[in-house]
Amino acid sequence: MSVPFYVSPEQVIKDKADFAQKGIARGRSVIVMQYVGGILLVAENPSHTLHKVSEIYDKIAFAAVGKYNEFENMRVAGVRLADMRGYSYDRSDVTGRSLANAYATTLGTIFTETQKPYEVELVVAEVGDDLESDQIYRLRFDGSVADERAFVAMGGSAEELTSELGRRWNKDVDLQAALRLCVSALSSVSAHSEQIPVNQLEVAVLERDKPRRKFVRLGEDRLAEELGSDASPASTSTVAEDTPGESGGDVGVSDVAGENEPEF
Amino acid sequence: MTVPGGLPNEYLTSTTSSFSEFLRTHNPDLLPSRNAAAMDTADHGHLAPHGTTIVAAAYADGVVLAGDRRATMGNVIAQRDIEKIFAADEFTGVGIAGSAGIAVDMVRLFQVELEHYEKIESTQLSIEGKANRLATLLRGNLGLAMQGLAAVPLMAGYDRAGKRGRIFSYDVTGGRYEEHAFHAIGSGGYFARGSLKKLHSAGQSRPEAIQVALQALYDAADDDSATGGPDLTRQIFPKIATITARGFAFVDQSEMEQQVTHMMDGRRERPDGPLASTGGA
């Protein structure tokens, strides 16, 4: 009878953490940033249909890096949780904090109780009435949760981005300044030699002053306008993001099967 | 593996994009139709307030959806400023006639249903898809409807693919019928429809369409005691929404006041409303 090797719990945890961290660092980065009028979410994402930033509820957005199927699963569960809570209580009773707690517990359990941890890192952002009341929760693969201010960079070269943004962010940035800051920081760590073209960017905002559903995607035209003349024109693709009726099926399939998949 | 405080397992494993389907499987107590089986088959319609007339009419830019403001319980006016017109999503409106509490619950579920689908699938349902979902929700209420607590919607929306306003009417069993040009439901619906026949024409402008809907509701209130007319002393006017390429929007109070004043001036001259042409006879 063979006796299994003894592996210390510390070693098991460390191996799992290393595994998850490697998976997350392989992808492209996402930045979530506060600006005067709300919260900006920017991702380098060549796909128009497989989103890395999305709407959860009126004031709450979701951003993720890592393995697509794993964070997509978390996103959909979050939408269900928020809609269920809003339907059984009231829309104003849906909070980012409770959603972040549910994610943290779930990620923590998956990390300790399964062989393979989720290779994801998430942000739950809730826009408030002013800069001070905004809430940004960052959730790691092991279920640890941090309450962040100003900005969060995750995935890919997150550390470089964080130090770069730390030097340049201030609490008076407006949407255009915040967007330019995010795009230039992402471009500096990206495989692109120049600024990332607008059709490779996925950008959304939680607009503080918008009534009810505050989540808005910014299409390519709007991005080109905000980024000014130095932005590369979106010559190859004219598909506006999130246009209802766009035939997502084929594009989605080729994205999954293609070489883009591991880069999420 | 459901952990206390974490996401319940079914939230992570369910594959449906429909909120009502998810409710039916995992939380049926929250469905509006939950109480139907518990009750007998007597008519309980007198228990709760009833909302009445809803009017919809297509015009050049889209469609108008209008409702009076009265809710009744038998001979008593239960509420004089009730709202029966709701935005279901950005491009769809619903007006409901019938048992008010059931109606409000149904609209709330329909609103979440559309938003939930939109968020999960990252695209909106087609207008036919929305109309069919509403039919399904309505069918779930059949048990209560047979006990006298029926609520029947009228859906109006802007079809972004076909670039025009569209109207869908329903029966209590969930039957769905597309209406062309205009429709009216509720206890004053027959009178409103008669009025619309004489006043509505395709391609009317926005102010014309609002005036036509207002006239139709006035005619309904004129002959149906459960439909409320404009209340000039309290400044309570019918609720009217337009749904166009720019989305769903209520007509604001000052514009309503102007339109109501215009109508009342005409009715003071001719109480039965504008005279339709006799076609040159």
Image (cartoon, grey):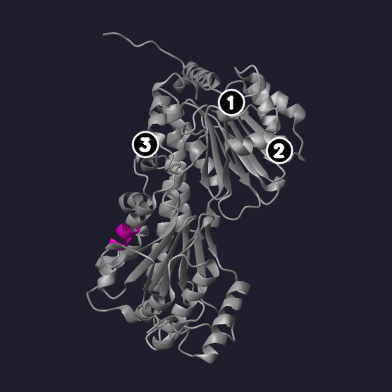
The residue where tag 3 is placed is: B1
- Marks 3/1: CA–CA distance: 31 Å
Q: Residue at x 34, y 55 (%)?
A: B133
Callout 2: chain: A
Q: Nearer the viewer, mark 3 or mark 1?
A: 1
Asked if badges 3 and 2 are on one and the same chain, I answer no
Measure the C-alpha gap from mark 1 to mark 2.
Answer: 20 Å
**Amino acid at the residue labelled 1:** Ser
Q: Residue at x 70, y 30 (%)?
A: A229
Q: Nearer the viewer, mark 1 or mark 2?
A: 2
Tell me: B204 left or right of A193.
Answer: left
- Find the magenta span and give its range: B134-139
Chain containing mark 3 = B
Quadrant for the N terminus of chain A in the image: top left
State yes or no: residue B136 in magenta. Answer: yes
Q: Which residue is mark 2?
A: A176
Parent chain of label 1: A
First-in-chain label (1 vs 2)? 1
Which residue position is annotated with label 1?
A29
- Secondary structure, mark 2, is helix
- Image coordinates for residue A193, horizontal then vertical, percent: 64, 16
Quick check: A134 left or right of B134? right
* Gap in angstroms between the C-alphas marked 3 and 2: 44 Å
Camera-side residue of A52 and B25: A52
Q: In the rendered view, would you say B226 is above or below A250?
A: below
Q: Residues within 10 Å of mark 3 (few under 14, many from 20)?
A: few
Crowding around mark 1 (Cα neighbors within 10 Å: few <14, some 14 to 19, many 20+) is many
Q: Main secondary structure of the magenta part?
A: helix
Snapshot quadrant of residue B146: bottom left
Residue B111 image position (x, y, % from top left) = 44, 57
Name which residue type carries label 3: Met
Which residue is nearer to you in this view: B22 or B165? B165
